[in-house]
Structure formats: structure tokens, C-alpha cells
Amino acid sequence: MTRLTKFLWPIALSMALAACGAKAPPAAAVAEAPASTVADMAPPVGQAPAIVTGLPDFSGLVAAYGSAVVNVTTVAQSEINDGGAPGLSPNDPLYDFFRRFGFGPPHGQPPPLARGEGSGFLISADGYILTNAHVVDRAREVTVRMTDRREYSAKVVGVDVRTDVAVLKINADKLPVVRIGSPAALKAGQWVVAIGSPFGFDNSVTAGIISATARSLPGDAYTPFIQTDVAVNPGNSGGPLFNLQGEVVGINSQIYSRTGGYQGVSFAIPIDVAMHVRSQLVSTGRVERGRIGVTIQDVNQALADSFRLPRPYGALVSQVEDGGPADKAGLKAGDVILTVDGRAVERSGELPAIIAGIKPGAEATLEIWRDKAKRKFRIKVGELEDDPEIASRQPAGNSDTGKLGLAVRPLSGDERQQLHTVGRLVVEQSGGPAAEAGVEPGDVLLAVNGAPVTSVGEFRNSVTKAGDTVALLIQRAGAQIYIPVKVGS
């Protein structure tokens, strides 16, 4: 079955390697070839010269930046629950059936640990690393190994599931770093190079060309992927994609495959998207995205003819959310969005990423096709909230403050509505001083020492700056209460 694969790879691996080749003809045989044979091979008189000549040598690029590419290994909790079958909830009718017949660990024992492996690359000399979110998903331990075999325990600064980007941090300095390029300059047919750890083989180099840009993939509406034919495999996840100038233009993320292995179609996250996510995760611990509240679809030739468009392009609005930003701005079903702040929308799949990149609360100008003419609308962009599933996938164990013994995560919009709270953080785990003081899982965190906190980053910074006693304002069962937590010296 054909499928898109985010290729995190288990460390345990057995394989057999085989090599084959054909012998080249003796040099003498080539030298003795008749002159007529050589003449026959020459291009006809008047034929245009070749546009492409020779092949690039990537050795200088690898020597300059290969040391900034790292191997990332993880230890995570298996998704087998309480001795039941893999992937089944304890509420599933088949759960007890599988448990009785020996699937999973004995009842009551914790699930086994799962080990995984991927790649990453250093973007700052003080230890910030970019990789894929799925590489460190639910990881309890993350280890980074350099090309010189030095190893560091890494902290997950933040993850963004929607773009599959994660930021790690190791405690080191004067580290080798990559250079960041511009994906906007990429063209189909240009050479690119990937460096990563396929199947655990550190610092493996593969090369190919750009197949296409701004690809939209099912389930990844907020990333305009770079498509390449570079050989990437399990373990390449999170590794860099370089142009010939030695600049990183993307993060290798997915492959399109019928078998689960490389088949000539791979996808990378544009580096500008990843760096935008990185700056927000480092500063606030969460990513803000814009939304306008419309359902859209592609415009084909028949629809273009129906709406009297010159050609098929733009994003056709099929539904407008009641009371949403688009509704307030006057958009309606049947409008075709052609540009956003002057940026052309060729296909509907491009629109979500464009809108998501606009800061919530900012105004944008949309050029719309309506009644056989172009019109312009000003719209105040709203904020795209994480749904409960995405919010719950944040790595709680790495969003904590060891000083208090708390693990927290962002609340989704739906969760905030259900809890009737303005708070944005919820306690997932409580231990140490916080648990002793009475902080419980499910408590909503509102402020630290009187200062409101709206993100994991703000919470972490506030606690770090606090003294021996930290006053937490929490909401529990509709009531607010301050809980003093004594940390000690």
C-alpha cells in the first residue's frame, strides 16, 4: 500500500549487505578502438551544446558542514498499555482478550521502553539543534552523538506537531554549526545533498535533485514541502538538506513509499518554516498560527469555467465559519482567494501555510474573485488553536521545571472552553516539592509569583527567576487558589 512515512527507525536492526558489479573493459581495448567509432560518437555539426556538463563534487560541502550533523537516539514509553494489545485502549472490547493470551507485559506492570533513532543538526554554537517532532515524540531520554563520538544528554525545548519540527538543547559551546539558506530560491532540477543516519549509519551522504517545491501532503496543510529524489531512509528523519552553496534549505521528514523504504520520492520541511517555528518555541514554548475560518478546495478547469476565471488557480471557498474572521470580513462561499498580502495562491493547499504564518490579531489583505471580477477585503486574522490530540502529544516529561517537580503542557482551545478558563497551561504530572505542596495533575496554571504565564517558556523562565518559595496561582474545579511551593536552597 502506498503511504507517506515519517521514518523514525528502531535501533535494533539486522540486515545482510550484498554488493555486485560488472568489470570495466581493459584500458587497452578502449585505446585500440577504431577512429571511426570515436567519430560516430561525436555530436552532429550544428547541434546545440549541452546545458548541463559534468557532475558536482560534494566532498568540500561534507568536509565543511558534516560535523554539524548529529545522530539523535531516544528512549520512549511504549504505547502498549497495561499488558493489552499494541495500540488498543483499555476501554476497547478486545483489550482484555489480548491481555489474557499474553500480549504485552503482565497486568499492572508498566509498558516496555521503546528505542528510536534519527538525525538533527546544530544551528547555534551553544547547542541548539533542529530535528523532527516525530523523532522525539514522547521521548523520556534524548541523546545526541557528534561525528567525533562525543555524546550529550539533550533537553527537548519544544515540539510543533503540525510542522513536525522540534528544538533540542545540549550543554556545550563552540560547536560546529550549519549555514541557513533560502528555500525561496530553489528550482526544480537543482542539486541537493542530504546528510543523516539512515539505519544508524552516522553521517551518511546522499545526493539528488529538487523534484518540486511547495508540495501539499495529506494531513500536513501547514507545510509547503520540498520534494526531492535524494535517497533518504529510516534514520534520516530530522537531518539537513543542503544546496550546493553549503546552506541548509530543508529538514528531511517523510518519504512516499509502497514498501516503507526509499523509492525515489522524499519530502523536506523548508528551513524558513522550521526557523520560524524554532524562534517561537525557544522564546515562548508554543507556536502561534493565524486562521480565517474557511473551508477551501482546489479550482479545476470546470470550476474555473463556471466562475469565469481566466484559468484554474486560487483557493475556492466552499464554507465560511459563522462568526469567524472571514465571515466578519464579508467573505462567502463561492469566493476564490487569489492573493494574500500580494502573495499569489496558485493552489488551495498553499493557503493554510500562508495564513498560518500571519500573526494572530494582524490584518491581511485578500484579493478575491467574485462575480467575474477581482475585489479586495481586509480581514483580521484569528488564532489557530491546537486540538486536544495535538496538545496531548507535547512531550510532558520535557516541558517541566525540575526545580518544582512539575510537568506541564499547553491547553487546547476546546479544553479551555470546557474548563471555562483563561489559563493556557495544565499540570500533567506533579512530584517533588509541588506535589508535597498540593499541586495536582489537571490543575490549570495561571500565574507564578503574581505574573501571568501563558506558555511553557514563560512558566519555565518565571520559576527559574523565583526564589526559594514559588507562589503558584492555579484553577481547580472552577475556583482559583494560590499554592506556595517551598523549593529550598
Image (tube, rainbow, N blue to C red):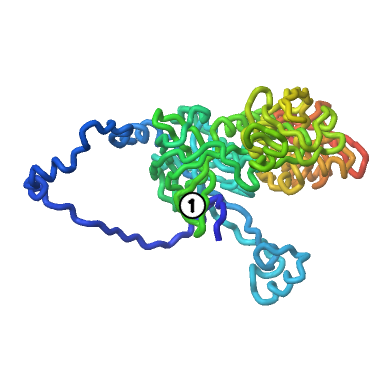
Q: Is residue 44 visible?
A: yes
What residue do we see at 64% from left, 32% from top? Answer: 310
Hey, which residue is sitting farthest bottom in the picture? Answer: 101
Mark 1 falls on what kind of element?
loop
Judge from the rendering whether residue 131 lies leftward or rightward of residue 373; answer left or right: left
Amino acid type of disc 1? Answer: Pro
What residue do we see at 64% from left, 68% from top? Answer: 104
Hey, which residue is sitting farthest right in the picture? Answer: 479
Judge from the rendering whether residue 258 lies leftward or rightward of residue 400; answer left or right: left
Judge whether 414 appears above or below 366 on screen: below
Judge from the rendering whether residue 245 lies leftward or rightward of residue 45; answer left or right: right
The spot of residue 275 in percent (x, y) is 58, 30
**If the image is split into quadrants, where does the N terminus sit?**
bottom right
The spot of residue 113 in percent (x, y) is 59, 58
In depth, the one of 442 and 370 nearer the eye is 370
What residue do we see at 52% from left, 40% from top? Answer: 268
In depth, the one of 400 and 90 nearer the eye is 90
In depth, the one of 58 and 16 nearer the eye is 58
Density class for disc 1 (Cα within 10 Å; few <14, some 14-19, many ≥20) is many
Judge whether 415 appears above or below 327 on screen: below
Q: Is residue 471 visible?
A: no
Q: Quadrant of residue 153?
A: top right
Q: Quadrant of residue 242?
A: top left
Quickly name the residue at label 1: 234
Judge whether 262 appears above or below 176 on screen: below
**If the image is split into quadrants, where does the C terminus sit?**
top right
What residue do we see at 50% from left, 47% from top? Answer: 118
Judge from the rendering whether residue 404 lies leftward or rightward of residue 220; answer left or right: right
The spot of residue 289 in percent (x, y) is 71, 33
The spot of residue 343 in percent (x, y) is 63, 26
In depth, the one of 88 and 168 nearer the eye is 88
